[in-house]
Amino acid sequence: MDEVMSVKDFLYTPRRIYSQIVVQREKINALRLGMLPSAIRYDKDPVQTSPTDPMPEYVAKLDEAERELSSLMERYHRAIGEVCEMICHVPDRRAQIVLVKRYLSGKSWSLIEDECQTSRRTVFRQNRMGVRLIADFLVKNKSHFCH
């Protein structure tokens, strides 16, 4: 059972990283808005042109935020590749479809049920079977599991 939970945690990794990407993009947009000159912005005091000019600070923060976003994007693409590789080891095509729709596309159970034109019970069974097959594969081939 512990292996199944570990596999589910592994399968959800791309979605967790994607959530971090969304937050990072919002942070970058907020920093970019902070850099707009006061002539365009009405919600901030006029920009000071003195030794306390905040612009270099904004630029440094923006640069760091963009580097972090780039790192998150690399982790996201790597995680998707790893999850796809594991799903490919599931021999049942229908179980593969359920796993892709749930863990990579982030679709709800009811949407998967509708798209696959099958019952929720069948969707859950295919998901459970796929996760167990991945867990079995990982136990047999521990070197493949990079998590």
Image (cartoon, rainbow, N blue to C red):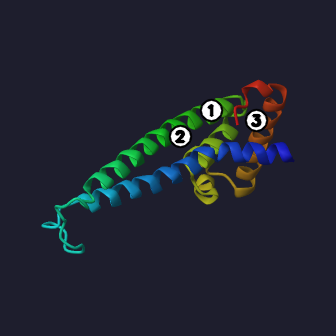
Instruction: State the residue position of label 3.
Output: 134
- Which mark is on residue 82? 1
Q: Label 1 neighbourhood size at 10 Å, few (<14), some (14-19), many (20+)?
A: many
Q: Residue visible at 49% across and 36% down?
A: 74
What secondary structure is found at the residue carrying circle 3?
A: helix
Q: Residue visible at 70% across and 55% down?
A: 119
Q: Are marks 1 and 3 in contact (CB under 8 Å)?
A: no
Residue 77: percent from the left, percent from the top?
Answer: 52, 36
Report the number of numbered marks: 3
- Which mark is on residue 76? 2
Amino acid type, residue under disc 1 in the picture: Glu
Q: Residue visible at 46% across and 57% down?
A: 23
Q: Is residue 17 above or below residue 55?
A: above
Residue 33: percent from the left, percent from the top?
Answer: 27, 61
Q: Please state if 26 lies on the left or on the right of 93 as rendered.
A: left
Amino acid type, residue under disc 3 in the picture: Ile
Between marks 3 and 2, how big is the CA–CA gap? 20 Å
Between marks 2 and 1, how big is the CA–CA gap? 10 Å
Q: Please state if 129 lies on the left or on the right of 19 as rendered.
A: right
Q: Label 3 neighbourhood size at 10 Å, few (<14), some (14-19), many (20+)?
A: many
Q: Are marks 2 and 1 in contact (CB under 8 Å)?
A: no
Residue 43: percent from the left, percent from the top?
Answer: 24, 75
Residue 24: percent from the left, percent from the top?
Answer: 44, 53
Question: Residue lying farthest left?
Answer: 39
